[in-house]
């Protein structure tokens, strides 16, 4: 009887220890599982590429303090595949990867983003004017601007301003980001009579049925002329590119233009739009479908209302290669400058 009871006690003890190992009491913690990734997408290839926000914190430009290096507490990854399906991932410090990719209907994207960026007070900036969360839009290169703009609007409504597009370097290399920060929701109104802080270079992107496209290097050259005129006139105002995009321009073309403008010396990028949205059950998938007849059209760009010169066949010049940024963001990420620019633009024009 004693031997039988001893065996029962040993079995009970073994069961308790096994249970403790499962719940993390008395045993080793289970290893975190890798999340389910979203469908693969072909990210645009550009020259202005920095590190993902989960690997680095923003580095201030021009001494702007609101984007000083600080640990990233949370990052959203919004992927839009070639069919227009949207997938959302949430990363936090200590996570093994970006987490499970959850498919989100376009109609619910705004609500899903706000739940991760604003509902919890811990996701807000200390002054509660904006979300402290970072967001990366991973959009397939074929997806039209109208679809990407829908996601940008959803992020803006969630008070997210630390926005970047997922991109790849022009040559071989790991995925990175091209920052396109949005203005912060701050009351930084200029003093009456105060000199404006920024100057504008207007970029208008359209599509043409015939003829060659606008080439990167020629666009960069046109913007460099604007930058040089500002400097030669004695002004030292940073230039902000205001970008107006036709609805069916592929996101790859949009980011190539942003890349060229930044290479030319533009300090910030602000996307313009009329705020209108096509009413439908799935505006992102509809934008992908509506853009198909325009897929073969060529990109055309105007700089300050003038067409970028089209080179003779055979004389096209590629943009020079640039080194990928490591350990920091790359692109347009001076949030204070962008906020001030928007306030100036809406409080008296340019």
Image (spheres, grey):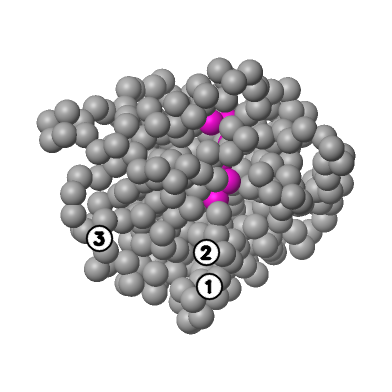
Question: Left or right: 81 with respect to 86?
Answer: left
User: Which secondary structure dominates the residues rendered in magenta?
Assistant: strand
Question: Left or right: 197 with respect to 294?
Answer: right
User: Residue 20 placed where, x, y %?
Assistant: 68, 52
Q: Is residue 270 magenta?
A: yes
Provide the residue span drawn in magenta: 266-271
Badge 1: residue crowd in 10 Å (few <14, some 14–19, many ≥20) = few
Quarter-wise, where is residue 308 in the image?
top left
Q: Earlier in the sequence, mark 1 or mark 3?
A: 1
Q: Residue at x 73, y 35 (%)?
A: 196
Disc 1 from disc 2: Cα separation: 8 Å
Question: Left or right: 44 with respect to 133?
Answer: left
Q: Residue at x 18, y 49 (%)?
A: 211
Label 1 close to label 2 by CB (< 8 Å): yes
User: Residue 199 placed where, x, y %?
Assistant: 62, 35
Which numbered circle lies on residue 295? Answer: 3
**Mark 2 secondary-structure assignment:** helix
Quarter-wise, where is residue 245 in the image?
bottom left
Q: Is residue 144 magenta?
A: no
Q: Earlier in the sequence, mark 3 or mark 2?
A: 2
Disc 1 from disc 3: Cα separation: 21 Å
User: Residue 329 placed where, x, y %?
Assistant: 56, 31
């Amino acid at each position: 009887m004693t031997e039988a009871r001893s065996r029962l006690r040993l079995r009970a003890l073994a069961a308790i220890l096994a249970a403790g190992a499962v719940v993390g009491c008395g045993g080793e913690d289970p290893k975190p599982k890798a999340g389910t990734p979203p469908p693969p997408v072909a990210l645009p290839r550009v020259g202005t590429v920095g590190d993902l926000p989960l690997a680095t914190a923003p580095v201030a430009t021009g001494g702007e303090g609101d984007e000083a290096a600080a640990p990233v507490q949370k990052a959203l990854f919004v992927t839009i595949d070639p069919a227009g399906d949207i997938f959302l991932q949430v990363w936090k410090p200590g996570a093994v990867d970006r987490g499970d990719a959850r498919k989100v209907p376009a109609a619910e994207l705004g609500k899903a983003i706000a739940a991760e960026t604003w509902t919890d007070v811990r996701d807000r900036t200390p002054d509660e004017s904006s979300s402290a969360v970072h967001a990366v839009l991973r959009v397939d290169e074929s997806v039209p601007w109208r679809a990407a703009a829908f996601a940008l609007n959803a992020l803006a409504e969630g008070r997210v301003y630390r926005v970047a597009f997922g991109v790849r370097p022009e040559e071989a290399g790991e995925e990175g980001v091209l920052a396109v920060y949005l203005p912060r929701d701050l009351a930084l109104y200029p003093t009456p009579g105060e000199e404006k802080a920024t100057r504008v270079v207007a970029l208008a992107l359209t599509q043409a049925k015939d003829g060659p496209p606008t080439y990167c290097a020629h666009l960069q050259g046109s913007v460099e002329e604007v930058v040089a005129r500002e400097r030669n006139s004695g002004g030292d105002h940073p230039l902000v590119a205001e970008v107006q995009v036709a609805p069916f321009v592929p996101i790859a073309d949009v980011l190539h233009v942003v890349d060229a403008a930044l290479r030319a010396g533009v300090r910030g990028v602000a996307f313009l739009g009329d705020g209108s949205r096509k009413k439908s059950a799935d505006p992102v998938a509809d934008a992908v479908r509506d853009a198909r007849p325009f897929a073969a059209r060529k990109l055309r760009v105007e700089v300050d209302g003038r067409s970028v010169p089209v080179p003779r066949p055979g004389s096209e010049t590629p943009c020079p290669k640039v080194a990928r940024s490591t350990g920091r963001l790359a692109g347009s990420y001076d949030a204070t400058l962008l906020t001030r620019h928007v306030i100036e633009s809406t409080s008296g024009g340019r």
